[in-house]
Image (tube, helix red, strand yellow):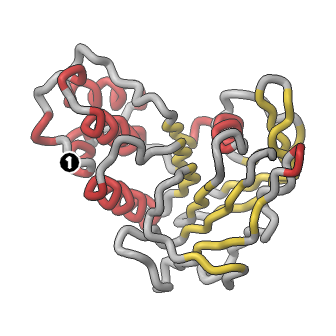
Amino acid sequence: MHIVVDNLAVARGGVTVLQGVGFALSPGQALILRGPNGSGKTTLLRTLAGLQPPVAGTIDLPPEAAAYGAHADGLKSTLTVRENLAFWAAIHGTEGVEAAMTGMDVATLAHRRASELSAGQKRRLGLARLLVTGRPVWLLDEPTVSLDVASVTLFAGVVRQHLAGGGLAIIATHVDLGLPEAAAAPDRAGAGRRLDPGCLGAPARRIQAAARVAAAGTGGGPVGAAGVPGARVRRLRGPG
């Protein structure tokens, strides 16, 4: 599974917010999207997930290959933690409910209704849904909202494990996942990697992608304690 995006333009409310977007991801790689509110991160993710059509350009990513995690956790409040995950596992025809609960540290809450959980616990349960989808591509919009420091570290570990298994991830976040940053850092993610310095293009009204890269190849580049190997960061600047 590869993701190839070429000359993509996306719109929100009939207004083009990003254009000239182009990047390629191979198995085991991730792209981190950073930028202020309104810079087009959510719109880009929704377009990649097939929830809205692009204005222009091409996306080589079958919608059925992607699991999209939006701001809302998508939980059934009257169901227990285990029942929520079993519901999604049944929809996707997969298993692994117990492993998902363990992975996001909600196993001890298995018999509690979602309505009884704290905001952080609900978020962890929402992220555990990713583990039962069985889908290789994760498209995540601010997944660390409501998570404490320990849970952010836990989440980063889950992403690392997903990438190590050949998965891919595109994550919009304002939170530092421990990725070291350097201007025009060399590519250390291994052969076949292509991600142009201007990969997120120039959106309408001068939104620009800064040429800043978080380099950490799966082969052993330096990463922070919560770092995600195989990832690259692109920053977007909002209008004005």
Side of 234 where 203 appears, left or right: right
Count of marks, rendered view: 1
> Residue at 41% of width from left, 25% of height from top?
74
Task: Write down the quadrant of residue 53 in the picture.
Answer: top right
Task: Write down the quadrant of residue 55 in the picture.
Answer: top right
Q: Position of residue 16 (x, y in %)?
A: 85, 35
Image quadrant in which the N terminus is located? bottom right
> Can residue 7 be seen in the rendering of this structure?
no
> Residue at 80% of width from left, 38% of height from top?
10
Q: Position of residue 75 (x, y in %)?
A: 35, 24
Side of 216 where 150 appears, left or right: left
> Residue at 62% of width from left, 65% of height from top?
233
Q: In the current view of this chain or complex, which residue is farthest to the top?
A: 78
Residue, disc 1 = 105
Q: Position of residue 118 (x, y in %)?
A: 23, 32
Residue 99 higher or lower than 32, as above or below: above
